[in-house]
Amino acid sequence: MTQTEFRHRIRISKTDVEGQYPLEYVLQDIAGIGRAMAKAILRVTGLDGKQQAGYLSDEDVKKIEDVLLDPAKHGIPSWMFNRRKDVYSGVDKHLIETDLMLAVQEDITTMKKIRCYRGIRHELRLPCRGQRTRGSFRHGTTVGVKRGK
């Protein structure tokens, strides 16, 4: 594909992204990739983050996907990964897309199974991170307030 051809949609790692936006922001649309990881991927691949994603060639897309599959092999430090010291394998990983969703769901299921505080809060559909619950997180019969006559 030549540099002049523009594609409105590009498929990067099982995700369709818009071609009209800069590459730096398009990478952040992929689940599991934030701002820092997107910049690291661009630095490793040598691509310009300001260029529109629609002008990417197939080789550039392949480069990005290779880095996404194994970021450690391409020199991205392990402290940037989103799953360090994985509970099951003990390896530093960076998960994206469905792998990330499945891992998070598996973690929540494990917490529920071992009946830890966060697992119980997840079961009851209450906040796990210390938020106040007087006005928020109200559903079911607790929504209304009954007043005495």
Image (tube, grey):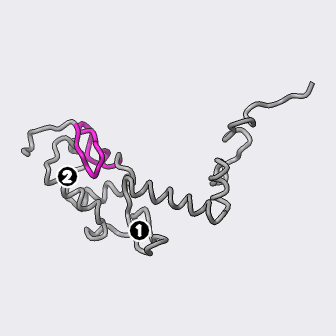
Query: Which stretch appears magenta?
Result: 9-28
- In depth, the one of 90 and 114 nearer the eye is 114
Give the structural element (helix, strand or loop) at label 1: helix
- Residue at the image position 8 percent from the left and 45 percent from the top: 1
Q: Amino acid at mark 1?
A: Trp
**What residue occupies the far left of the structure in this picture?**
2
Which of the two marks, 2 or 1, is nearer to us in this view?
2
Image side of residue 62 versus residue 140, left or right: left
Badge 2 vs badge 1, beta-carbon distance below 8 Å: no
Dividing the image into 4 quarters, which one contains the C terminus?
top right
Task: Please provide percent x and percent y for residue 95.
Answer: 38, 60
Task: Please provide percent x and percent y for residue 146.
Answer: 83, 30
Task: Please provide percent x and percent y for residue 34.
Answer: 39, 53
Residue position marked by numbered label 1 in the rendering: 79
Q: Amino acid at mark 2?
A: Val
Query: Is residue 70 on the magenta stretch?
Result: no
- Residue at the image position 61 percent from the left and 63 percent from the top: 113
- Residue at the image position 17 percent from the left and 53 percent from the top: 60
- Residue at the image position 56 percent from the left and 59 percent from the top: 109
The answer to which image quadrant residue 94 occupies is bottom left
Residue position marked by numbered label 2 in the rendering: 61
Neighbor class of circle 1 (other Cα within 10 Å; few <14, some 14-19, many 20+) is few
Image side of residue 119 versus residue 19, left or right: right
Give the structural element (helix, strand or loop) at label 2: helix
The mark nearer the N terminus, 2 or 1, is 2
